[in-house]
Image: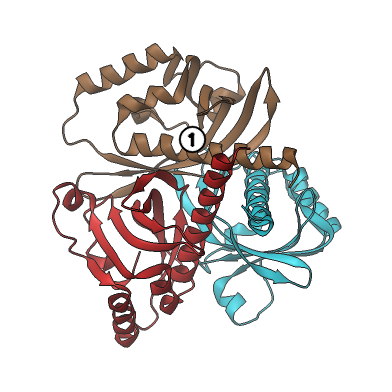
Chain colours: A cyan, B red, C brown
Amino acid sequence: MAGADLGAVSLQSRLVQLNAEYARALDDDRLEAWPEFFSPRCRYAITSVDNHRRGMPAGLMYADSQGMLRDRVSALREANIFERQAYRHIVGLPAIVGEAEGFVRAETPFLVVRIMRDGRMDLFATGRYLDAVIDGDPLRLRERIAVCDSSRIDTLLAIPL
Amino acid sequence: MAGADLGAVSLQSRLVQLNAEYARALDDDRLEAWPEFFSPRCRYAITSVDNHRRGMPAGLMYADSQGMLRDRVSALREANIFERQAYRHIVGLPAIVGEAEGFVRAETPFLVVRIMRDGRMDLFATGRYLDAVIDGDPLRLRERIAVCDSSRIDTLLAIPL
Amino acid sequence: MAGADLGAVSLQSRLVQLNAEYARALDDDRLEAWPEFFSPRCRYAITSVDNHRRGMPAGLMYADSQGMLRDRVSALREANIFERQAYRHIVGLPAIVGEAEGFVRAETPFLVVRIMRDGRMDLFATGRYLDAVIDGDPLRLRERIAVCDSSRIDTLLAIPL
């Protein structure tokens, strides 16, 4: 393999690891680890595909620093929801779509299943992550926009995606 | 790593990228990009596991050249379905199952969620891609047979998988 | 890439291949191939997240050798269920979480869709594999605990996950 090829393989491999660890932190309810996947200056938002297409601001969750992500986690912990449901993220294969402004741009589909306390499961959300990633060791998210396919996502308010 | 090992890693990595880009083109409704994942001479079919097992011809969609794939896309565009539903492909991990007749053979599971305009989501299809891939830069599909697990797939007619 | 980095990329790539082949064997109903993914001395269990958290023994399926896995397959074949349903595993991205006692520890989410003979599909199970993997060529499972998110899994008894 040529050096460029090796680099592409390595980058993809590290994106896979980043996404796997990210999903694992959320599904294990280790929310305090979640802001650590981002750089100190960052942008995180949950939006719907309709809002995203129209260039409308994200309505569901928005943060523009790691500190705001930490505040969000604290707020969730204080809400202290009893017997809450669980979630399972199935993150698809990441596509590296380019480099821009010094960041690696990647798009990765996701599917989230919600598991109720009584054992019922349902499709909770699908969509794609639009990422700007800082290429370091480890990779860090400069930006992650979670664009949900469905606009029926009011109940998403409770958790990061 | 030995050279052979490196080659296997690189091939898997490029299969991941191919599948990620393929799913992304379909889900972004960039159907015109879809034939470009195939070689000029190619075979594409959507079938059910029952038909596939019996060696019956694919009933749902069939094309044996990139030109036919382009025609298919044109026909879909002309049908010009209003307010149509969206789809989300979650493509699983590709298994490299061998080489035959100069092609890499791979099998990759998929799951497709359909998102209605009112926000409802349902499991639309699951199955596996049976691929013959031409090992070049980039990889191109010489053959992709999408074998659906369920035979209830009449409504599939509308979109490539 | 440095040697260590190459090693990590190679390990992840082989974990992807292991998981892809594992899922493929189950979904193709090649159950006889399933014990071959394990080492002769091994541990396999299916449990629920609640039981796992409480340290309770796995109730649904348990084996502590490759021989027991083979017995399990024989029993399933003898039960010889007519017109049985099919399954589709979508295995997520594997996270390498460390090394312990000479094994690679990995965690990998999964989602299983069940396809009835009449074509209906439903979400059958979600969860994660907790693996101890022997780093060889090929990789072999020393331990795989399939922890299901839902405790409603009585019907799981029929098949390995």
Q: Can you say whether C27 is above or below C67 in the image?
A: below
* Mark 1 belongs to chain: C
Q: Is residue A21 left or right of residue C31?
A: right
Q: Secondary structure at mark 1?
A: helix
Please tell me which residue is depicted at 34% across the width and 68% down the height of the picture. Answer: B160
Residue placed under numbered mark 1 in the picture: C18
Crowding near pointer 1: few (<14 within 10 Å), some, many (20+)?
Answer: some
Q: Can you say whether B129 is above or below C125 in the image?
A: below
Horizontal and vertical percent position of residue C8: 67, 39
* Residue C149 shows in this picture: no
Q: Is residue C104 left or right of residue A35?
A: left
Please tell me which residue is depicted at 63% across the width and 28% down the height of the picture. Answer: C105
Horizontal and vertical percent position of residue B69: 31, 75
* Residue A96 shows in this picture: yes
Horizontal and vertical percent position of residue B3: 58, 42
Q: Is residue B67 left or right of residue B28?
A: left
Please tell me which residue is depicted at 39% across the width and 49% down the height of the picture. Answer: B106
In the picture, which quadrant includes the C terminus of chain B? bottom left
In the picture, which quadrant includes the N terminus of chain B? top right
Q: Is residue A124 left or right of residue C24?
A: right
Using the image as rendered, state which of residue A98 and residue C132 is in the foreground. Answer: A98
Q: Amino acid at mark 1?
A: Leu
Q: Can you say whether B108 is above or below C34 in the image?
A: below
